[in-house]
Image: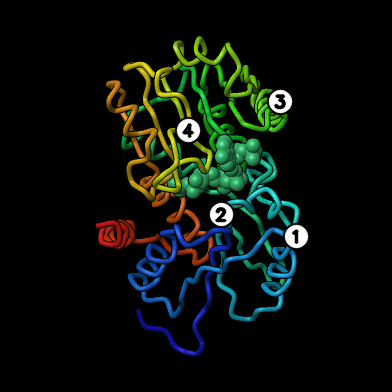
Amino acid sequence: MSFTAAARVFIVFGDPVEHSLSPVMQNAALQAAGIDGLYIPWRVKPEGLPIAFESLRRMENFGGANVTLPHKEQAASLVDELSSEAASVGAVNTLVPRGGHLLGATTDGRGFLRSLQEEAGFVPRGRQAVILGAGGAARAVAWSLAEAGVSRLFILNRTVERAESLALLVSRGCGVSAIGLCPSDPRVSEKLADSELLVNATSVGLAASDPPAINPALLHPRILVYDLIYRPRETALLREAKKRGCRVLGGLGMLLYQGALAFELWTGQKASEEAMRRALIETLS
Ligand code: NDP
């Protein structure tokens, strides 16, 4: 990687952030495009995010940023302007500098849908889905599935109020039947039995010692299990789902596609997905 003192700086904000493969992927894209720039991780706690964003407004060589867990919803309240998609979803994963102002956008939903359709051949229209989680990524996934025409959506979250409020958001915004439940609710097993897609959008699975994000005994072979987590590549949820005959997919494709869209917003250039994919695979192996 080479850059000069005039380089544009790109950042990923998170806490933790060490698991993120965005630096390796985006630096490969910058290099492939011949852009004088570098992409760095910035670990910050939620209380530090407002000051960090304020610094960006004054940073002359700021090129753009990503926002990862747990900051996506807070970021939406800290930017100066929101894309219509980010305003609908209430979460931001991409910051774009606009002459001293910050535009907040989200590319997670489109990245997820592309991965789901291209890598798993799964077409959401008319099918029932269950999402685990109600944080920033879950919001984008729920909205994208609702817009893609799922028949029904069940959102399960430890903090049930957040699941209910996300369900309300997508049912009002997209006219889809959506219900928020607590994962221990007795109705969950019946909802899963009738579903063809289960998406883990919680952070359960990021640590190699984490248990499956849901009781695997509730899974059946007709369900596709998609885990947004990409590191480790195989979470306990995916491992257990495979044992039960389910098709499974991890979050690496989503990472690549949401990252390519963010790169295009920052630079106005098409990202080299080939260079990004190669960098990801090399790092993971
Ligand atoms: P947030 O911090 O916004 O949300 C975390 C979610 O996980 C919340 O619903 C939270 O529940 C739940 N959760 C956290 N700990 C536990 C636990 N111990 N038991 C049960 N539920 C728990 O994070 P994001 O939405 O930004 O990210 C979620 C995951 O998705 C992360 O693993 C992230 O790496 C991944 N991701 C992957 C992407 C990709 O490109 N592949 C893109 C975006 C995210 P509660 O509301 O109760 O706190």
Q: Which residue is drawn at 59% across and 33% down?
A: 143
Q: Mark 1 or 4, which is nearer the eye? A: 4
Horizontal side of 53 relative to 95 (left or right) equals right
> Hey, what amino acid is under mark 3?
Leu
Q: Which residue is drawn at 51% across and 60% down?
A: 17
Disc on the earlier residue, 3 or 2: 2
Q: In which quarter of the image is residue 253?
A: top left
Q: Mark 3 or 1, which is nearer the eye? A: 3
> Hey, what amino acid is under mark 2?
Thr
Q: Quadrant of residue 52?
A: bottom right
The CA span between labels 4 and 3 is: 23 Å
Disc on the earlier residue, 4 or 3: 3
Of residues 5 and 72, which is closer to you in this image?
72
Q: Is mark 2 within 8 Å of ligand 1?
A: yes
The CA span between labels 2 and 4 is: 19 Å
Is residue 229 visible in this depiction of the protein? yes
Q: Is mark 3 within 8 Å of ligand 1?
A: no
The CA span between labels 3 and 2 is: 24 Å
Is residue 108 visible in this depiction of the protein? no
Checking the image for residue 213, the label placed there is: 4
Q: Is mark 1 on a helix, strand or loop?
A: loop
Q: Residue at x 51, y 23 (%)?
A: 130
Q: Is mark 2 on a helix, strand or loop?
A: loop
Q: Mark 4 or 3, which is nearer the eye? A: 4
Q: Is mark 3 on a helix, strand or loop?
A: helix
Q: Mark 1 points at which residue?
A: 80
Q: Name the residue under label 3.
A: 168
Q: Which residue lies furthest to the front in this view?
A: 209
Q: Is mark 4 on a helix, strand or loop?
A: loop
Residues packed near mark 4 inside 10 Å, few (<14), some (14 to 19) or many (20 plus): many
